């Protein structure tokens, strides 16, 4: 792996995953950054941060959109948010800041920056999630080993898993019986869309099971803008976001969730169970 002689003229020809230039003209490998996870997928990043991370944990990974684009994946309570970090050829842009060296970029994170998304969620980047984690060499011993004679073959072994895409934020929801609008805190995790009285409420008002949802679409029937609806057999839920961009983001990820659910159903996955809970 080559080392750059100068910042000018060299960085634009280097693969950004190979090096970030330092201001002193030497090169520093991006792979040496302990919380850079290379080609880790979005799915795997969310699984790692949700299972082993904590609020404020983050990691940097390659974006699958194009070369020179990275994703900063950050855990925000029970969801994971993803932000772009862009390589311009001479520097790296993150949010409103631009860094000419890896050293400056890391120093910025050492000061625990505060970032905010379009949903209004504020996140302090506290805990870089390491690429290398100690793992115990402990294994269970097999005491019983037999096979159920089901008649299934290797063709029936289709690997499936719940989709991990997450999102959270405030939305305005129309009531079911009384058609008034109230602002609620929504969280999307796995196949469940929950809404709470506010962000600090410990228990959800309701949990909507997306396996029962038949459609998600923009809605223009209400006297509000940036509205969309979720169609269930028992009711259609009308929701409004603050901006059109935010409404579009909710629609995209909810539609993606439904497409993943349908794929699993088409594959005959028996692990999906339909349910809807009402707490109050």
Image: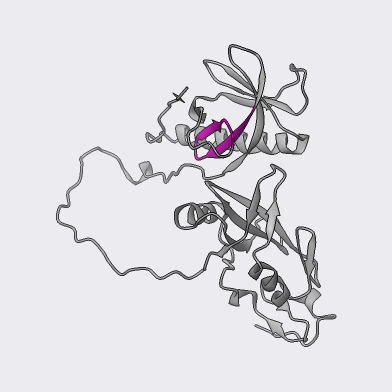
Q: Is residue 3 left or right of residue 88?
A: left
Residue 16 seen in this snapshot: no
Q: Which quadrant is the N terminus positioned in?
A: bottom right
The image position of residue 186, as x and y in percent, is: 59, 35
* Residue for point 38% across, 36% down: 271
- Name the outermost residue toward the right: 8
Q: Quick check: 55 left or right of 152?
A: right
The colour scheme used to paint the residues is one colour
Residue at (57%, 68%) from the top-left corner? Answer: 35
Residue at 64% x, 74% y: name it: 30
Q: Position of residue 88 (x, y in %)?
A: 80, 66
Residue closest to the far front: 200
Q: Position of residue 262 (x, y in %)?
A: 51, 32
In magenta segment, residue 83? no
The answer to whether any part of residue 202 appears in the image is yes
Can you say whether 30 is above or below 169 in the image? below
- 186 within the magenta span: yes
User: Secondary structure of the magenta portion, mostly?
Assistant: strand
Q: In which quadrant of the rendered view does residue 245 lie?
A: top right
Residue in view at x 53 percent, y 64 percent:
129
In the rendered structure, which segment of residues is drawn in magenta? 183-198
Q: Quadrant of residue 83?
A: bottom right
Q: At which x and y percent is residue 124?
A: 63, 57
Q: Is residue 219 above or below residue 99?
A: above
User: Which corner quadrant of the image does residue 3 belong to?
Assistant: bottom right
- Farthest residue toward the top? 177
Q: Is residue 64 above or below residue 269?
A: below
């Amino acid at each position: 792996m080559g080392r750059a002689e100068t910042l000018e003229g060299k960085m634009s020809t280097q693969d950004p995953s190979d090096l970030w230039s330092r201001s002193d003209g030497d090169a520093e490998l991006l792979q040496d950054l302990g919380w850079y996870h290379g080609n880790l997928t979005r799915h795997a990043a969310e699984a790692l941060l949700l299972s082993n991370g904590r609020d404020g944990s983050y990691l940097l990974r390659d974006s699958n959109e194009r070369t020179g684009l990275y994703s900063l994946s950050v855990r925000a309570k029970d969801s994971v948010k993803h932000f772009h970090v862009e390589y311009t050829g001479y520097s790296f842009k993150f949010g409103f800041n631009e860094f000419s060296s890896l050293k400056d970029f890391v120093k910025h994170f050492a000061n625990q920056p505060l970032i905010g998304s379009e949903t209004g969620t504020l996140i302090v980047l506290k805990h870089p999630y390491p690429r290398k984690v100690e793992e115990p060499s402990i294994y269970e011993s097999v005491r019983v080993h037999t096979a159920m004679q089901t008649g299934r073959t290797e063709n029936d072994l289709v690997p499936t898993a719940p989709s991990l895409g997450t999102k959270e934020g405030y939305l305005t929801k129309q009531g079911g019986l009384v058609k008034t609008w109230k602002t609620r805190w929504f969280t999307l995790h796995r196949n469940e869309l929950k809404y709470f009285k506010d962000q600090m409420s410990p228990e959800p008002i309701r949990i909507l099971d997306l396996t029962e949802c038949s459609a998600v679409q923009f809605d223009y029937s209400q006297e509000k803008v940036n509205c969309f609806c979720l169609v269930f057999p028992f009711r259609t839920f009308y929701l409004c976001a603050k901006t059109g961009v935010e409404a579009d983001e909710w629609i995209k990820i909810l539609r993606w969730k439904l497409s993943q659910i349908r794929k699993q159903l088409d594959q005959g996955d028996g692990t999906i169970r339909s349910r809807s809970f009402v707490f109050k």
